[in-house]
Each structure stands twice: as C-alpha cells, then as structure tokens.
Amino acid sequence: MQYFGRALMLLGSLAATTGVFAQEREWYFNSGLGYHIFDSDQKFDDAIAAVIGVEAKLNSDWGVEVTTIYSEPENEDNNATLDGEFISGSLSLLRYFNFNSDFVPYLATGVGAAVIKYDNNPLDDEDEFTQYNFGGGFRYAFNENLSLRTDARYLLDDDSDHVGGVVSIGLSYVFARSGSPAVAPADTDGDGVVDPNDRCPNTPAGVNVDRNGCPLDDDGDGVPNYKDKCPNTPAGRQVDEYGCKFVLKHTESIKLEINFAYDSDAIPAAYVGELKKVADFMKQFAGVSAVVEGHADSTGPDAYNKQLSQRRADAVRNALISNYGIAANRLSAVGYGEERPIADNKTAEGRLANRRVIAVMQAETVE
C-alpha cells in the first residue's frame, strides 16, 4: 500500500495548486471489481482484481486520479510456490468529454509503481517495477453524487516490456466539493427555466410554465392559462384567441380565388394580397380551418388535370404555411381536376376561369 500512499500524497499536492481552475472541483471515491489480464511471459492465469481510487475533477475537461489495483494471480503451471500477489498504485490524468451530462466518457493515462509478491516462495521473493497505463472509460450518473463507472486500461511494465490490462466496473461517489461553482446559465425571462432549455423565451413575469419554459395550458385548447378567459374548454372544441368558443351564426367563408396560367401551378404575383387576406382572417379566428380547392380546365387528359389541380391547391396551402405562419394542421388541400367547371371550356376566357384555386373557410357555429 506504500505505492498508493505516495500517489495519494502527490494528488493532494497537485490539488493544492489548482487555484487557476475557476469551476467547482469534485472529489470521487471509486471502487469496483475487474478482470486482470497478465502477459503470457509472466506465467500467471488471469485473475479477479479489486480496484479502488480517489479522483479529483479539476474542471469540466480535466481530472486526476490515484488508483490501486490488487489481485492474486495463480501460476499457470499450478506451481503454488509461484502464485503471486499483485499490488499497484498509480497517478493518472483524465480527459473528460461532455462532463456536464449524465453520461461522461473519458480518456486516461498515467504512471505508477507495482509489486508482485510470491508469498509461498521460501525465498520470499518479489518483483518491483514502474508501470504505465493508458485507456479510458465512462461514468453514468444515477443522481448528483452516485454514478456507475467502467474503466479499461493497458498496463505496460517499463523493465520487462510486459503488457497486460485491467477491465473494471463499479460505483463512484462524490464525497466532497470545493472551489467556486460554475456560473449558472442565464434565465432571462425569470420563469425558472434556464435559457438553453427554454422553448418559450420572454414569458411574462409571474406566468406558470412547464419544464420547457412554456406557459401552462391546462385544457389543451392552444391558449395558455394566463390568456385563457374560458378555462376547462372541452377537448376538440374550436376556440378564439382568448380560449373561448366561437360565437358564429353560420359557416364563415372568404372568397379567395386565384387563376393560373395554362399548365402551371405557380401562383401569379398579382394574388399576393389575396393570400394575405386569407392569412389575416385565419389569424383573427384562431380556430378556423380552411380547405384549399384546386381546379383545372378541360384541356388534356382527365388524370393529368387531376394531378395539376392538386399541385395548384398544394401550392396555395404551402404558401399560407411558409409565408404567413398558418399552422399546417389548419389547412387541407384537394384537387378536383376538371370536375367542377364554372365557365365554358370552349372559350379562352372560360378556360382561364376554370383554372383556379379557391379557399373555403369553416368554423363551428356555437351559441
């Protein structure tokens, strides 16, 4: 254990000089069981190992660790006088990745001293050597203090070029914290949800929010509680911007009619104003939905005209969604082809009139 003690003293000296690290430091006690793999030249069978250590997280990227490994390997030729007792102590540098999450992988490299004692040997012989290690692992946090830790290291002896390794799994416990804590993320709107996690920034002061920082909407009508003048709206009922049912005496409709060029689904620029009127209407009545109907003249095959009219309807629907922010679930599009003419297809004027898209607005009538 003298090697572990020396390494622990070195860790303490290093920690005393880490004032340059502004973030909060954490001290872990690591313990676990492992599988100790020996070089074939050492004439040992692989063995179960105990692994314990103390780890200091210096900041979110770097840490240091003192580790001791203990195992009792048996001679592979069943010669009891050559059965061993392996003890090592090492100091390692750790490079963390993604430390502020629950899952933290890391790389490690270090150096230490090891000894193999042959307790059954009449000569009480033992081998001492310097041992280098490199590898990595990960920590998975169960809570603020307790985590699962796995580790895998190559072990290289400096005097004999023996190469082995230890793979271990165990628990890691935070037994102390020191230094200045990291600066907490900002919460600009003061709703209790930090800005990186806040999906609804600029929430008014005093509004109750969910874990995503969005105002609560208990009745699920799309209007948050603080704006909802009619709470407990039944599920599925269309409401206005205040969360109240529509008071409409009939089905609302707006006369959006767009005429298209021959064999085209491009919306002519002249109809931008008409599209805006439809968008404004839908924004005024938050629960109104719209059916966008596409039509074609009789020129060409029926099947092609059906597809063309659908493309025209889709073009208008997509424009309302993309350009004016209307929710996609409030709009549907259907193409009727040449099935519903409103003018004579034998004239150029009639065909132009039939190449059209109209939008029909619908709202539930509730007294």
Image (cartoon, rainbow, N blue to C red):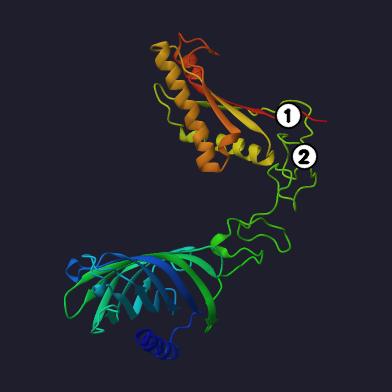
- State yes or no: discs 1 and 2 in contact (Cβ < 8 Å): no
Of 57 and 91, the residue lying toward us: 91
In the displayed image of the protein, which residue is found farthest to the right?
A: 367
> In the picture, residue 300 is in which quadrant?
top left
Q: Which residue is mark 2?
A: 233
Q: Residue at x 56, y 43 (%)?
A: 325
Whether residue 105 is visible here, answered yes or no, is: no
Residue 8 point in image, percent of width and height: 40, 86
Instruction: Determine which of the numbered discs, if any, sits on residue 364 in the image.
Output: 1
Q: Amino acid at mark 2?
A: Thr
Q: Is residue 182 left or right of residue 80?
A: right
Q: Residue at x 48, y 16 (%)?
A: 337
Judge whether 30 appears above or below 249 on screen: below
The C terminus sits in image quarter: top right
Q: Residue at x 23, y 69 (%)?
A: 79
Instruction: Name the element at disc 1.
Output: loop
Of 354 and 148, the residue lying toward us: 148
Q: Amino acid at mark 1?
A: Glu
Whether residue 176 is visible here, answered yes or no, is: yes
Residue 120 point in image, percent of width and height: 28, 77
Judge whether 343 appears above or below 6 on screen: above
> In the picture, residue 276 is in which quadrant?
top right
Circle 1 packing at 10 Å, graded few (<14), some (14-19), many (20+), is: some
Q: Is residue 117 left or right of residue 289?
A: left
Q: Earlier in the sequence, mark 1 or mark 2?
A: 2
The N terminus sits in image quarter: bottom left
Q: Is residue 158 left or right of residue 327?
A: left
Residue 232 point in image, percent of width and height: 79, 42
Q: Nearer the viewer, mark 1 or mark 2?
A: 2
Circle 2 packing at 10 Å, graded few (<14), some (14-19), many (20+), is: some
Q: Residue at x 19, y 66 (%)?
A: 40
Judge whether 317 appears above or below 56 on screen: above
